[in-house]
Amino acid sequence: MPRKKQRERRLNWFRLLIVLVAAGMLLGGLAAFGLVVVSLKDLPTWDPAALQPNNATLIYDVHGNLVTEIGLENRIPVDIGDIPPHVKKAFLAAEDVRFYQHYGVDPRAIARAVWANVTGSFGEQGGSTITQQLVKNCFLSFDKTLKRKIQEAFLAIQVERHYAKDEILQMYLNWVYFGEGAYGIEAAARTYFGKSVSELDLSEAATLAGLLKGPSIYSPYRDLQAATNRRNTILDLMWRYEFVGRAEAEEAKAKPIELGKPVAADNPGPSYPYPHFVDHVTDVLVDKYGEARVFKEGLRVYTTLDPKIQRAAEEALNNENNYPATKRDEHGVLQPQAAMVVLDPTNGYIKAIVGGREHTQLRQWNRATRTQPQPGSAFKPIIAYGPAIEYLGMSPASVLDDIPIKYPNWTPRNYDGGYRGLVTMRTALAYSVNIPAVKTLEAVTPSRAVDFARKLGITTLEPDRHNLAIALGGLTNGVTPLQMAGAYGAFANQGVYIEPTAITRVEDIRGRLLEEHIPVKTQAMKPTTAYLITDMLRTAVTSGTGRNARLADRPVAGKTGTTDHETSIWFCGYTPNLVGVVWMGHDNHKDRLPRGSVGGGHPAAIWRQVMGKALAGTPVRDFPQPPGIVTATVDSKSGLLPGPLTPPDHQVTDIFERGTVPTEYDDVHVLVEICPSTGLLAGQYCPDRITRVMVDVGYDVPEIVKDYNIRVPRKTCALHDRETVFNPPLDFWPPNGGQQPETPVPTMMNYARPQCFFGSNRGRH
């Protein structure tokens, strides 16, 4: 009896379990059915026209006028019959190997993708078929939800019912985005390899097929190694699925990816206006919103573009008279190249960008925002003189000794090969003298100088490679013209740095606000520091190396830059209204410009042409002087107050930050007795001597230094000694008891040699 009860009890539990499982399956089925019903309730209307590109993003200028639309330009439709079999097979291996077997949805692919995600094994393909990917691009949003996946599957089946497989594959290959502004397989072939899709070899086909997983990640223009690895993965898949033989795949893998000169379809370049600026805006949008959203969802983008200034910049940089001898390199690109950025320093708004001469393809390489050449002497205000004023209390009248100097692994030299001797900071900066800049950086220390530069948006400096060569722009990683414009903007804006921007507002296709730019202001330096740098850079333009940038009726501050061997030349200048930076050089950063090319030449001339047009018709403004600026007269050889021996031509009147005017008097001008025969200090036996006011800083300098002749000699005359002194006979002397003096008594030199306070706040550095 008990056994029978136990058997009945087990049977009851088993029945209950069956009921619960059945109920669960029923509820699950009902829930799934309900989800499908809900998902299909707002399914997009089936419309074959939706398979065509649409919803371009609109770009507006600073005045709210439409400039252009992006998203439809670089797409060249191609017939499926013109696509070679090995190209089609590369995409099938990469995206959907069972494309010709399934009906739009592939359960095997879904199971394979789920298994790969669960186990973490090698999953080369996702669960979406080529048809589903086409549907997602044409009909649906990019939300990753179960509802969207259900809609995607249903619409994929619809597409399969209306179109043949080759038609679907043709639409897909003409639709997908390959990066670098290329839509569709034909545009991609032209962009990456400079040829039509019908000319692609197996390696090139696999490279393009590999791009679809991540165009910005696997672009050979951006990361050649990543592109090569991805191509090899596709070739392995083609062999696995028996699309190619092992030997053929290995041969293609051994071939390096060779990018060709991009070619346009039927015209020399994109037809949209202001292409360099539009390209930059597009890059910024893609980085933030993703390529699919930018080129598919119809954003409304309001920019800082000023057409008047942009046109002026494009005209100047495309004028071959503004360049030395021009030629085309092995890729057919004009050399030397140039780039320019113009911005408003008060808000960081970029008014114009020109990324090079000519514009032959969509989103081509932008030298204004991507190229990082060495800045040369244009870096001196940022890395040496700015931090010296900010941290050490130096001034334009601080004295620096331009004499030969040697470090363990480096010997800096001036551009002209000469040495000026004792000069003020103003003179050193205006005439771009190198050695004073190196000494100034040494006094500041590279680490503090780098901190100062980073506050100005210079983020490319490597923390482990700081050395004194950065005073002359010798950087491991260079800087972009856009970064230099932002940094100089802080000098023009009373020390306030504002990160440059080209976009003020972004809306979606329905007008809903996605972002609105609010400038972030950072007080990178004291207003007085910025003003002192600006005033010195005005001297560089009025009488120094930047004279070619002078504007007749406006104050201009600016700095030239020329790298070793003339590989890059710069002019970075500004008015109270605008900052402009011009770079010129070769794309490989190795070929030299013609000997004698300097930043004060072609770059300064381009700057003057552009800024003259940009500022025409605007009020003339002066640089506002902040509180705390005072004027004082000092000795130009000591940096101290003039002393009793300071000659008039060694007195200069300059500006200072209040509290940094020297309080001590000059101590380097001294009276010395010089032997006229040798020009050395008069010795005990020199018969003649001249008393002179000379400069003594406590150390010797070579004769090649320009002010050598005004410095106290470090040696005493050795020409005259006891034997050379004239001793007359006894009867020559007047009657005086018949006694001859034992030894002549010379006039002795007597002065105290001052010390040299290099790097002190006494004024001499």
Image (cartoon, helix red, strand yellow):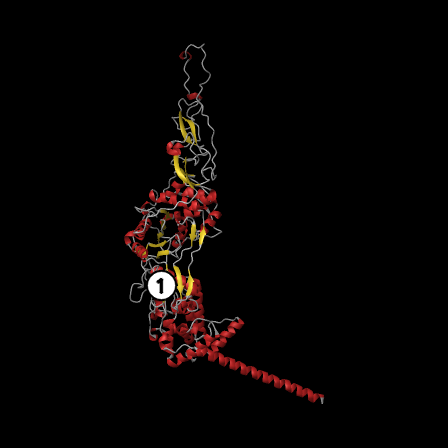
Q: Position of residue 713 (x, y in %)?
A: 42, 31
Between 521 and 116, the residue placed more toward the observer is 521
Residue 690 is left or right of residue 117, and the answer is: left
Q: Is any part of residue 229 visible from this angle?
A: yes
**Amino acid type, residue under disc 1 in the picture:** Ile
Quadrant housing residue 514: bottom left
**41 vs 242, nearest the viewer:** 41
Name the image quarter holding residue 100: bottom left
Q: Percent x, y for residue 356? A: 34, 57
Task: Give the quarter of the image for residue 51.
Answer: bottom left
Number of numbered discs: 1
Q: Secondary structure at mark 1?
A: strand
Q: Is residue 130 above or below residue 66?
A: below
Label 1, on which residue? 59
Left or right: 6, with 115 as reference point: right
Q: In the image, is residue 75 above or below residue 466?
A: below
**Residue found at the very far right of the displayed protein:** 1
Residue 481: horizontal and vertical position, in percent? 38, 53
On-image quarter of the N terminus: bottom right
On the image, the x and y values in percent for residue 452 come to: 46, 49
Left or right: where 707 falls relative to 445: left
Mark 1 crowdedness (10 Å alpha carbons): few <14, some 14-19, many ≥20: many
Rendered position, 101 above or below 296: below
Q: Is residue 264 above or below residue 745?
A: below
* Quadrant where the image shows the C terminus: top left
Answer yes or no: is residue 220 visible: no
Residue 203 or 271: which is nearer the viewer? 271
